[in-house]
Image: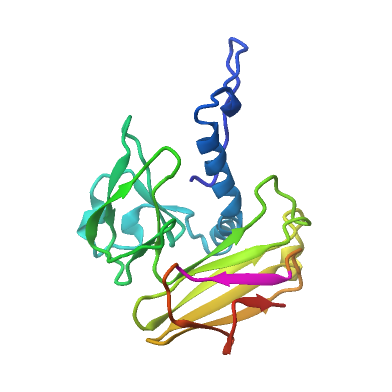
Amino acid sequence: MHPRFTIHSWNDDQTVNEAWMYPAITPAIRSAIELRYRLLPYLYTLLWQAHADDEPMLRPTFLDHQHDAQTFAECDDFLLGRDLLVASVVEPGARQREVWLPDNQAGWYDFYSHQWFAGGQWVTLDAPLEKLPLLVRAGAGLPLSERISHVDAQKDDRRELQLFPLKGTGSTRGLLFEDDGESWGYKQGDALWLEWEMTCSASSINLDINARGNYRPAWKALKLSLPVGEKRKLLVNGVEGTEWRF
């Protein structure tokens, strides 16, 4: 789950070590790689924020939770951007992972099950080989791709913003950044800055979206999704719906 991901398969004895050589675990490896492909829009936005705002992509948990003393303890957890809490599994044979959830006043969602947890507590999460424990900050929106083969901006024609709303009332903000991935066009405004604000009340979730920049990606509609079990009505720029279009 690091921004830079490589498989070093060359050895000086001219042997190789490839994922497909281990059929028993190849499905788990494939699943992890596909998850990374899905997260590329989030990673690309983090790269932009690192460039534009000097925001670190990889963050120790105390960076955003300095008031939480437990986050200063030595651990293998880290934040990928502000919104994803990665609970690395480093013990041989471990199939569960005890995780400290930083006290962020809003709580955390399990990325897979969408179960919500209050911050400032220890939780035990399942950690099979097929699934890396991931948690999402409540109030976040994760931009995801549905393309999982190889990177091609012209063929990346589906985009989803997976919303993880506050359980109570309040508002949060987020950004999706995209460009052609090749040129310096962003310097002349040839990029897409999709800014959103999510305002939560007891009965509704209102997502206000504003697009800036001249670039238009291959995808034309932004699919919006809520956690399993979320009953509140979703409004997009004041109108009930489940997608946003240019």
Give the side of residue 192 with respect to residue 226, left or right. Answer: right
Give the side of residue 222 with respect to residue 5, left or right. Answer: right
Please check the rendered image and state whether residue 131 is part of the magenta-colored stretch, yes or no. no
| In the rendered image, the vertical position of residue 241 relative to residue 61, given as above or below | below
Nearest to the observer: residue 48 or residue 236: 236
| In the rendered image, the vertical position of residue 38 relative to residue 171, given as above or below | above
Q: Quadrant of residue 139?
A: bottom left
User: From where the camera sits, is residue 48 visible?
Assistant: no
Give the side of residue 161 with respect to residue 187, left or right. Answer: left
Q: Quadrant of residue 216?
A: bottom right
Please check the rendered image and state whether residue 226 is part of the magenta-colored stretch, yes or no. yes
Instruction: Considering the whole magenta stretch, tell me its main secondary structure.
Output: strand
Nearest to the observer: residue 178 or residue 160: 160
Q: Which colour scheme is used?
A: rainbow
Nearest to the observer: residue 117 or residue 197: 117
x, y percent for residue 72:
25, 52
Nearest to the observer: residue 133 or residue 174: 133
**Mark count:** 0
User: From where the camera sits, is residue 223 visible?
Assistant: yes
x, y percent for residue 204:
45, 85
| In the rendered image, the vertical position of residue 191 relative to residue 211, given as above or below | above
| In the rendered image, the vertical position of residue 155 relative to residue 188, given as above or below | above
Residue bounds of the magenta highlight = 220-227
* Residue extending farthest top: 13
Give the residue drawn at x 42%, y 37%: 129
x, y percent for residue 14:
62, 12
* Residue extending farthest bottom: 238
Give the side of residue 149 with respect to residue 203, left or right. Answer: right
x, y percent for residue 135:
39, 57
Give the residue drawn at x 32%, y 31%: 93
Give the residue drawn at x 61%, y 49%: 37
Q: Quadrant of the C terminus?
A: bottom right
